[in-house]
Image: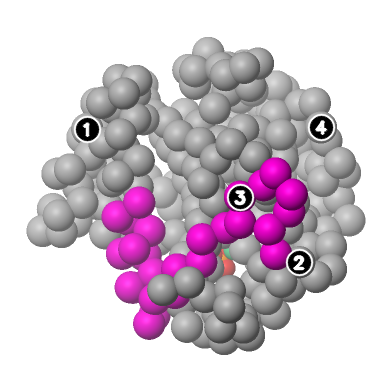
Amino acid sequence: MGQPGLSAPRVVVGRDLAEAARLGAQEVVARAQAAASLRGRFTLALSGGHTPQALHALLADPVEHFRGRISWAATHVFFGDERCVPPDHPDSNYGAARRSLLAHVPLPASNVHRLRGEDDPLAAAAAYEAELRRVVPVEPGLPRLDLILLGLGADGHTASLFPGTAALDEETRLVVANEVPQVGGFRLTFTFPLIRAARAVAFLVAGEDKAAAVSDVLGGRGARPAARVRLAEGDLTWYLDEAAASRLPAALRRP
Ligand code: 6PG
């Protein structure tokens, strides 16, 4: 599975989504504490869709022991992709994260960096790339986010990098407006150069419907977009529930 010069991903399997999300939340806390103490800032990109809601709930829960262990004043939140809709639209990834996490933690409003889905997509993508370069430490030449959270579609897409779309081949820009026929329009998305520059990337994937894509990506088969998330300098982890991991050989499922 591992490619020469690239670290093999760590695969962590929880009994169910709740446990996989809890394991992922532990990594968010660990990365937040390390980044804040080493660099005075933790830069985190959230993924969209439904799966991360379980993780957001854990991070937001005052009773759980995650919320109080993150320095939210030192945390800057970004979004790996966004639908081209206003923030109050039911499809907005920002809107979903605001309801499930951002409204429940003491994160300064100026530390939330949303993709402006309501603007012209090309302009919004260019503006976001400039904001990333302004806020995220650049090493060397690329903004290096401390942790990028990603999801996976049943077709193997991640962020809004869908099969057969132009953004898959973008090697210069960090954020683009990607025309996605599968969703009938444009999406704003991180590109692979930005994802690959991260200190850490963590996928959180759950459900039987994702098992084939997970098996193909981790087994090095086929051309699923998520298979192109390879880190030369960062840590890549897949947090799966048993259903999403159900087609993985034992060798790929580290304890
Ligand atoms: C989005 C996401 C997308 C998502 C996958 C999985 O905006 O939809 O960024 O990449 O992570 O489609 O979505 P679910 O978690 O809803 O299955």
The reply, left or right, for residue 167 in relation to residue 137 is right
Residue under numbered circle 4:
171
Name the quarter where the N terminus is drawn.
bottom right
| Badge nearest the viewer, 3 or 2 | 3
Residue in view at x 57 percent, y 19 percent: 139
Residue under numbered circle 2:
220
The reply, left or right, for residue 157 in relation to residue 41 is right
Name the quarter where the C terminus is drawn.
bottom left
What kind of residue is marked 1? Ser
- Using the numbered discs, state the Cα–Cα distance from disc 1 to disc 3 in whole angstroms: 29 Å
Residue in view at x 19 percent, y 56 percent: 61
- Using the numbered discs, state the Cα–Cα distance from disc 1 to disc 4 in whole angstroms: 33 Å
Residue 71 circle label: 1
Q: Does residue 206 lie above or below 128 as drawn?
A: below
- Using the numbered discs, state the Cα–Cα distance from disc 2 to disc 4 in whole angstroms: 21 Å
Q: Does residue 159 lie above or below 138 as drawn?
A: below
Residue in view at x 34 percent, y 20 percent: 39
Residue 31 circle label: none
What kind of residue is marked 2? Gly
Residue under numbered circle 3:
7
Q: Is residue 9 magenta?
A: yes
- Using the numbered discs, state the Cα–Cα distance from disc 2 to disc 1 in whole angstroms: 37 Å
Magenta-highlighted residues: 1-27
| Badge nearest the viewer, 4 or 3 | 3
The disc, 1 or 3, on the residue closer to the chain's N-terminal end is 3
The reply, left or right, for residue 206 in relation to residue 24 is right
